[in-house]
Each structure stands twice: as structure tokens, then as C-alpha cells.
Amino acid sequence: MTNRPVIGITLGDPASIGPEIVVKSLANPEIYDLCRPLLIGDAQVVQRALISTGVKHAINTVASPAEATYVPGAIDLIDLKNVDISTLEWGKVQAQAGQASFEYIVRSIELAKAGEVDAVATAPINKEALKAAKINFIGHTEIFGEMTGTHDPLTMFEVKSLRIFFMTRHVSLATACTQITKERTLDCLRRSKEALERLGVTNPKLVVAGLNPHAGEHGLFGDEEVRELEPAIAAARAEGIDAHGPLPADSVFWHAAQGRFDAVLSLYHDQGHIAAKMYDFHRTVSVTNGLPFLRSSVDHGTGFDIAGKGLASSVSMEEAIKVAARYADSFRR
């Protein structure tokens, strides 16, 4: 199928499980049925991952996506040659690993902006390694946002039938609580609706998770729901958005997983992360919305404790590639 989308796959932190889960994913023929996968990384790191995992693949080094063959058994790789393999240690924070992982991301963004890849799927990076390399970004979302001129990209998790949007991301819980305002809630509901419609969901039904126990019990356990969330939901409904809640956070994700809602707006990082990962840790995929192209990612870390041992599961990486392939058409030019 020549119309399969081209998915740019970044290698992640080269000292992490990223290279291992990527080569394991590309050993699954189903990936090639769905898309044309193109790896962006370092050939020596990929070769080391092939040895540690026992995957028997050739490496086909290419200069551009147009040169790739996209057939099972050969990993098409844009080789940035940016790692000194003799000094790269598995499972450790290293400046060269942080720099290399950043450069993989940059190249993937350049290719996507040029229309040479249809979507990007990213393997995990390490925030401490980025800092060691003096790279002033806290993570993937911030890099993609800055390099595409996207203000405040909206993160969505997808796991089976459950979708979760996040009002706040990598801030302290105390800071997150100050950011839960009527204005921000209404803005997130608007953008969540737009994101779902772009992904093919017609007239999506959204629900907002509560902040306090029992969603505040009408002000008995905190007034954020009454003061900020309820007015935002009412304003959204007045605009024609099918918004509901706030519903208690201890049950709202279950209701959404049963199909009652198309997505939940989670108020802070761990509220939605815990729900998704308890539902199915390995199949939770992160999607960054608002970019000019689709970016998906695994929703786990760099696994330094098992890096280089061939033990890491590739299920989440495979799911991230599949999600990118499934939604890429929504962003094709």
C-alpha cells in the first residue's frame, strides 16, 4: 500500500530503553501494514539495541524519507551520527545522550514541517539528561510547541476507549490548583472539542473531573468546582459544546471508559495519569494536539534500571506508532 502514512520515529534517549523498544516495535510486521516507519537516530546505538534485544534486522541508512524502502526486516534510518558509542553507558544520565535525543526530535519536527513525514512517534527522553546537556526544555511537549510556534499544546491520552485531556502538565500540584480557572477550563473545553473533531469524533461529549473529594459537595470540601468549573461548563454549553460535570475524579474516568463520555478533562498531571495507567499501563499513548502535525508518544519513562537488558516491553511504543498511523490522515496536506 503506497498510501500508508510515513511515520517519523525518534530513538529517544540513547542510554535508555528507547532504542530497544523501537527496534522491537519494528520487528512487528503489523507496523508495516499500517504505515511506513522511518527511524531518526544513530546507527551505532541502533546496532547496540539490536544486539541487546536479539532482534535480527538490517539497518538501511538513508538521507531522506524518499530513499527508504519501508519493508519488514530492514530498519530505515536517518543516521545523525551524534553519539560516541565508546563512552555511552546504558542506564545513566549523560549530557551526550540528552543532546542526541534533542537532535532526534529537532530533525523529526523539521521533516514533519516540510511534509516529508506525516506524523511523529517519540520514544522516551530523560529530563535530567536534557538539563545536563544545557537544553532549556523540560520535555517533548515544550520542544514541539516552541519549534512549531504552538502556544500551550494540549496533551491527550488515549488508552482503548478512554481519552483524557490535561488542563495542566508539569507543574507542582500547588501551582496546578492556581491554574484551575473558569477561563482556562473554558479554553481547554473548546480546544478539546476541536481536537476530537479533527480526530474524527463528531459532536464529542466532554466531562470535567472534579478537583476536591466528591467534586466538592457543592462547596462543602472546597469551592473550586462552584467558583470556577461549573461556570466554565455552563459557558461551554452555551457555545454548543456538549460539556458535563464536574464529576468526582474517583469515578469519572470509569464512566468515560464505559462509553458515557468521549473524553475527560483532567485538571492536573497525576489525576489523569493514574487513571490511564491503571486502566492499561502498556497501551496508554500520549497525543499532542494543536500542532500542525500529529505527534504521539509512549507514556512511560526511560527505564534506566532495565536499559540494555532486552527486558523492556515494546507494547506502548507499538501503540504509539499505530495511533500516529491511525490519525495521520487527519493532518495530511
Image: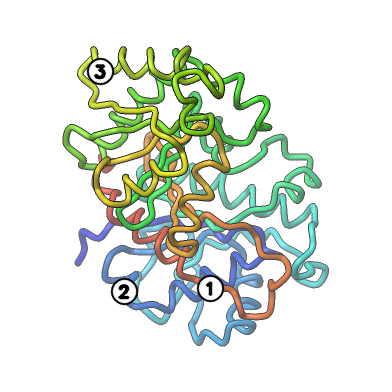
Number of the label disc, if any, that sits on residue 237: 3
Pick the residue in front: 73 or 206: 206
Image x and y of residue 294, in percent: 38, 44
**Residue displayed at 46% across by 35% down:** 266
Q: Residue at the spot x=75%, y=51% of the render?
A: 129
The amino acid pointed to by label 2 is Glu
Q: CA distance from mark 2 to mark 3?
A: 41 Å
Q: Are marks 2 and 3 in contact (CB under 8 Å)?
A: no
| Residue 203, position as x, y percentages in the image | 18, 32
The residue located at (48%, 59%) in the rendering is 63
The amino acid type found where label 1 is placed reads Ser
Residue closer to the observer: 230 or 286: 230
Looking at the rendered structure, which numbered label has been put on residue 95?
A: none
Residue 333 shown left or right of residue 10 in the figure: left
- How far apart marks 1 and 3 lie (CA) works out to 42 Å
Question: What x and y, as percent, mark residue 30?
Answer: 31, 74
Numbered disc in front, either 2 or 3: 3
Please state which of residues 110 and 280 is positioned toward the viewer in this rendering: 280
Q: Point out residue 79 in the picture as x, y percentages from the top left corner.
A: 57, 63
Residue under label 1, please give it. 313
Q: Residue at x 68, y 27 (%)?
A: 174
Above or below, 48 relative to 290: below
Residue at the spot of label 2: 30
- Looking at the image, tell me whether mark 2 or mark 3 is earlier in sequence order: 2
Say if 134 sits above or below 245 in the image: below
